[in-house]
Image: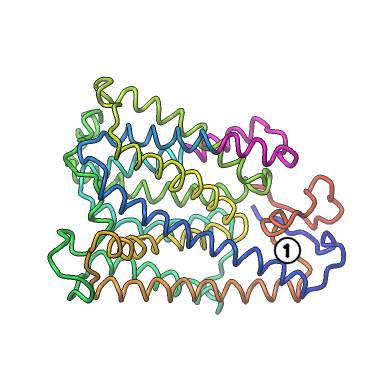
Amino acid sequence: MLQRWSSSVWGGMSGSGRMRLWENKAWLAHAGMAFVQIAYGGYHVLTKSVLNVGMNQIVFCVYRDLVALAILAPVAFFRERRVRRPVTPQLLGSFALLGFTGIFGNQLLFLLGLSFTNASYAAAFQPAIPVFTFLLAAIVGVEVFNVFSKDGMVKVLGIAVCVSGAVLMVFYQGPSLIGLAGTNATGGNALGATSWSSTSYPAQWITPAMLSFGLGTWNIGVLCLIGNCFLMGAYLVIQAPVLIKYPASLSLTAYSYSFATIFMVLTGVFATNGLHEWALTGTEIIAILYAGIIASCINYAIMTWANKILGPSLVALYNPLQPACSTILSTIFLGTPIYLGSVIGGVFIIAGLYIVTWIRYKEAQRLLMGSSYLSPLLLEADGAPDHKSGESSLNGSIDP
């Protein structure tokens, strides 16, 4: 899927001007992704502290998606009504696939994995998301990696350092540095202390045929968690070329959420045992509003826009920051102690992000200052003409 545009579409802009323009967009995208992880950290803290353990997780997801769609749809309609391109059947299929992978399937498989394993084990799998994204992006050609070049080796090193930090936070506790040890049953792992319980809502609606292959429920849970990470990586990779054809990022997110909400509502109808499961308490309403507005609507909109600027691999690489943000916020608001493992893991995560961001900056500097070709994601983000009106400036393309 690689398209390369001639620099003539910039109207004679100098290399330094192009670099400054890209820097402004890139740093905003980095700041946005950092906010996304902080917001997810707040989501884990909120659900841990106020959400009833016995609530049906599928019902929670249905309400969460409905709230997000109720905000995304009108905002996208009015904000992008002048720049939104016509929707083709092919685009509708892409939106449905994005909704199924990154929103519906991602949430559902995580809940199933959580029901069959436990919260700490589910959290341990999340650092696999940037690994899957990196591999998928390289395989399908969304991003070009040469692991034998200096830049490629540095990228791999940065990803490995970042993922290692997240894994370290999950599996190594160490002595307590801030707060009193023993105040948190999960040993300082905020993700492991999330409000979902492995027995709060067992996945009784999973067909027994899944157990007929000799696999236990724990094995099925592990497969679900692997699928959860894979689908999130696939979502970011699939979204990148779709953003070239349909650069209205808010509308793209809204369409994706529309399909995901339909899938989730249908699942909720079959997964519940009566209207009493749809009743909400005051604290559950607060958690749903935060999850729908912040953790879903705003976060997914930012991730889609950042994917257009940074690419799927770098967007996914921010995911390991989530346990670090959860730990810090849990300490501030819940008094959870901070352990040595969390500090060392956090340093590794930040170091890995810095390494990959630095090498990407160097690549962009060489590209924008000394080359006549530019990434289509950057051009679309900066308002460059679409490829239909500027065919003379195209040097060739390979569609996915």
Which type of secondary structure does the marked residue at label 1 adopt? strand
The single residue placed furthest to the front in the displayed view is 282
Residue 40: x %, y % from top left? 39, 54
Q: Is residue 283 magenta?
A: no
Question: What's the magenta region?
Answer: 72-99
Compared with 392, 278 (above or below) is above
Compared with 156, 60 (above or below) is above
Compared with 49, 74 (above or below) is above
Q: Which residue is mark 1?
A: 374
The single residue placed furthest to the left in the displayed view is 182
Identify which amino acid the numbered label 1 is placed on: Leu
4 left or right, relative to 391: left
Residue 103: x %, y % from top left? 44, 41
Count of marks overlaid on the render = 1
| Magenta segment, prevailing SS (helix, strand or loop) | helix
Tell me the quarter of the picture where residue 276 sits: top left
How many C-alpha atoms fall within 10 Å of the one at disc 1: few (<14), some, or many (≥20)?
Answer: some
The single residue placed furthest to the bottom in the displayed view is 150
Tell me the quarter of the picture where residue 16 sits: bottom right
Q: Nearer the viewer, residue 249 or 124?
A: 249
Residue 314: x %, y % from top left? 52, 63
Residue visible at 18% across and 64% down in the picture: 187
188 left or right, relative to 92: left
144 left or right, relative to 373: left
Residue visible at 33% across and 60% down in the picture: 326
Tell me the quarter of the picture where residue 64 sits: top left
Q: Is residue 83 magenta?
A: yes
- The colour mode here is rainbow
Residue visible at 67% across and 43% down in the picture: 246
Residue 74: x %, y % from top left? 60, 34
Q: Nearer the viewer, residue 385 or 69?
A: 69
